[in-house]
Amino acid sequence: MITHQLRHARLCMIFGCTAIYVLGFGPLPASLKRSPILKNSFARLAASVNGSVNGSVNGAQEKKRVVVIGNGMVGQRFMENLIGLDQSNQCIISTFCEEPRAAYNRVKLTSYFETRDPSALSMTEEYDQDGKTNWYKTNHVELLVNDKAVCIDTEAKTVTGKSGTTIPYDVAVLATGSYPFVPPIPGKDRPGVFVYRTIQDLEDMLAFVKDNNVKSAAVIGGGLLGLEAAKAVYDMGVEAHIIEFAPILMARQIDQGGHEAMVGSIEEMGLKVHCGARTAAIVGQDGSSDNDSRSPVAALRFNNENPSWEDLPVQMVVVSAGIKPRDEIANSCGIQIGERGGVVVDDFMRTSAPDVYAIGEVALHKNFIYGLIAPGYDMAKVAAEKVAADIGISQKDEDLLHKFLGADLSTKLKLLGCDVASFGENQPRPDDTDTTELVWKDPFTSVYRKLIFNKAGTKLRGGILVGNADDFTTLQKLAVSGTEMNPRDCAALLPPPMAKASPGNEEISSDPNTLVCSCNDVSQGMIAMAVQKLGVEGANLKALKKCTKAGTGCGGCEPVVKTILAEELKKLGGKVSNQLCEHFSYSRPELMALVRANPEPSSVHSFEKILAKHGHGDGCEICKPAVASILASLYNGVVIDDGRNSLQDTNDRSLANMQRGGTYSVVPRVPAGEITPAQLIALGETAEKYNLYTKITGGQRVDLFGASKHQLPDIWQQLGEAGFESGHAYGKALRTVKSCVGSTWCRFGVQDSVSFAVRVENRYKAIRAPHKIKGGVSGCIRECAEAQGKDFGLIATEKGYNLFLGGNGGAFPVHAALFASDIDEETVLMYLDRYLMYYILTADRLERTAVWQKKLPSGKNGGGPIEHLKDVIISDSLGICKELDARMQHLVDTYHDEWAEVVNNPKLRNQFKQFANTDETQEKDELIEFVDIRGQKRPADWPADGQPQTNWAPPADDVFSRSEKAWVLVGSVHDFSPNVGTAILYGSTQLAVFNNAKRGEWYVTQNMCPHKQAFVLSQGIIGDSSGTPKVACPLHKKNFDLGSGAELGGGDLKIITFAVKIVGDDVLVELPSVEEVDAILGTGGLRVLKSDCINISGDAIKVPIKNGVLNSVVASR
């Protein structure tokens, strides 16, 4: 503590200041990502660096210190507002943050499952390893993560954290938020009982579900937070039961009619709703129903009578039954607390203690706690203005300052795939006689709307919208503004937009003052002005949200923000762009549709024809692989035949995965993980013959690492003789269908999961798609194949299989959604045929099924994307099932093993020759050092960027300018495939020759990419950038100008280029002597070596091989 205070004393001496701090508990505050307010950040930074802030020694006014207690959404917004008002950098801010990471968007907590990346929820920027972001450093805000403020001394004016850190303040701001209210239910402390509030809560639930094989869970609470928690449980793949004490869900926002529409939509998704529930106890696995036992959750018990309710079997309980303000720190220091909790504040958010403010869910204003984010932001704005005035950084008179006089409680949310909105006086008091209601109730589409007018029909007072709220903004403005209406127009407002034959984009007003984002107080005019300032080139949704903050709160206004963006871009002569690249003004789905619908397939069956018909230029590393995927998905030719090798990305061109140092890994297909002993022996023999590193993959296959490209056909031939085919580990295609042993061996299995997985994998193998595809088949509900984490998954039941769609693992896991239950194998295949082909035809480039599926519309009866898929795949709502079936069957019927195609075709096999001008080869350990690790060989680690052996540069810009050169014959024109690069050997130097047949031009460069000194440039895709011919390095997509050798895109790397000419059929390159070229570019001098500071053998578990037996010996240290 002393050290901390001394450090701040030193700061005061340097800057001549006192300071301003923000006190905080958890992720309550957290503000707009780099809003216009942040323009002052640069002024603050410049002032501190340049010493332009005068200290008290010079007689200048001392800086003030503000401490914010709580770093959640509202506390973060307060800090941003205060920084925006602090034009001359007169205050210092500190904030206490109880959680391990800075402010994040708690309102969007359920979206955490889409990425499992906390940075996606950050209110500022990406988190570093300490849970902080660069925003705090840029704005000189001291962030104390993992440090809960525990004491405020209002006499000494200090705040103390749990760590012992004590900070003095001139102003303290309580932004501690709230905590979940847990009713005193017996058994509430059992393992398996959780609250829903933080990222850590979600992680704890996920771990519990996985470790305890949870299949069913109860969510206690049917309000806004309860339904969000139910969505979280549903996203975990767990059956969710919503338990609500009241007779209807969301009793504060909707009525009985809205409840019925919402329940219909929710239950269509597979969730169960139990209203009027009287929860008596959480029962343990030992049968106990008291607070003494710590036996894990087994059931929920009720005391409902007439009729009585049976116990509900569940293995997890999530309590989300409301919130209570976190006022304990205020209470402990004598600040006035309300009778039922909450820190009492006035209209300026001042508490009973001098210079202490409270905002957000901890603040009790006129005996009311506001549990929504928009009122919290309003409080933050009011408090920031008042604090700025009090400490002298603003000269506004108090009469001109904003006051908090209450808030509009209108809300628009999408809960469990269902629009739910309320606005104005949506539930008038029973004694209010000046009301007339119009009700729309459509049980077929689960849409309910109630609009409440005054008796005369001249004013809209409020309303409830369930199932469709596309016109929420228009209606809410009418109600809040009190605009006079013609009574004859009232009925026209009642039907939802989809019933007016105008579905699609959110309706927008012609009034620029219309409030669009109530969370951040952003009007339609502000958004329109931002689009105009950003311009056609710079305006997109991400940039718009960043500079206006619209859509960064609850997210309910995002559809209207998108509509305004599209409308304003249209006025500027532009449009929202989703085009592939500069060469095609179409997205992948649009380009796929153009090719697929062409009446003459022969006119669009090559990249050149598609480019001529629908694009321009030469193409690039983005559009070429995308078109290659489209061609493979529609026609299914050999991907490296007929010139298509020039379109393939890094791995597809070699039918293997390029690894560090330019070697390749080989992964044979092992359908469902079933492999014979003879095949295992063949894998071992192949690995030994070619000195390959071997590892079992996560998809039940064996990966062989370290093959040189010229060795691949020989390796494939040897594997083919043992019955292996390509595993397509290199392609955007089906990878694996994982299986457990099922009923063939397992005592719990109910279906033969291995046989069916083999059948499924063999049906869809080699099918190209926008992204990789993985499947799984589990033989029982124990789910050992992890099928629900795959793009498609099957779980066996006594009657057949449950089919799950749209999951994925990887960096951002997504749980698959249940599509159909208890279906037989033939039905499974029919549904999968249609699902996969629908995905192939309509997904964006590099879009996984999970992301694509989420973007799909709701079904005709609501229920989210999974219901839309049911409409398309089962009910044929789009009339395309016949086409989907036929296209998939064509792909199945035209299957070919790509490895065998190369092995058996000399022309294709020749593509794998290492050098076009010689049969000589350079082996892999001549290009990068290989080191021993646990009895196998692997390439040495790449040094970090900027270290020796990275970012290579020639000794001079034109190192060979004074050299005597000669024209050297390097081969014939037919030795160099069109529109690709080919390596040649000159002495010990590798050069890359590029035959750009599209332009009729040739180029020659070094083959080594200078970034990591890997000899791979000849394997890169060639194309152009704004007319400049280029090559993209296949490893990290560094782009180089083929003419000058300069790195494109702002980098400072450079490659050496050489003159080339064609004389008759000869290809000649102007080169210095072999000795000169080898001195600069010879592989011996550029070979990547292991770092001397890395002792690999000492850190590893050595596995020496003796007499064919592996003996593990732990290396001594």
Image: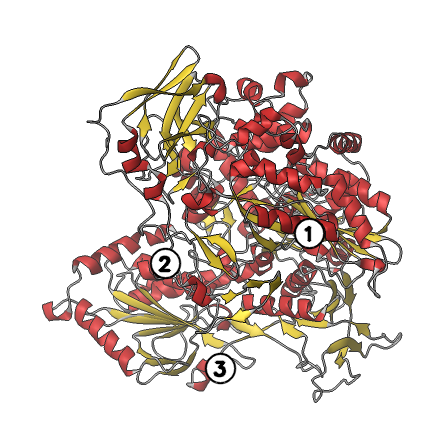
Q: Is residue 844 visible?
A: no
> What residue sits right under mark 3 in the picture?
328
Q: CA distance from mark 2 to mark 1?
A: 54 Å
Q: CA distance from mark 3 to mark 1?
A: 68 Å
Q: Amino acid at mark 3?
A: Glu
Residue at far front of view: 1107
User: Which of pointers 3 and 1 lies earlier in the amino acid sequence?
Assistant: 3
Q: Position of residue 641 (x, y in %)?
A: 60, 25
The answer to whether residue 273 is above or below residue 303 is above
Q: Amino acid at mark 2?
A: Asn
Badge 2, how many Cα within 10 Å: few under 14, some, many 20+? Answer: few
The answer to whether residue 942 is above or below residue 1032 is below
Q: Which corner quadrant holds the N terminus?
A: bottom left
The residue nearer to you, when weighing 721 against 279, is 721
Which of the labelled discs sits on residue 134, or is there none?
A: 2
Q: Residue at x 76, y 29 (%)?
A: 890
Q: Amino acid at mark 1?
A: Ile
SS of the residue under disc 2: helix
Q: CA distance from mark 2 to mark 3?
A: 31 Å
688 displayed left or right of 569: right
> What residue sits right under mark 1 in the picture?
681
The residue nearer to you, when weighing 38 against 595, is 595
Q: How many marks?
A: 3
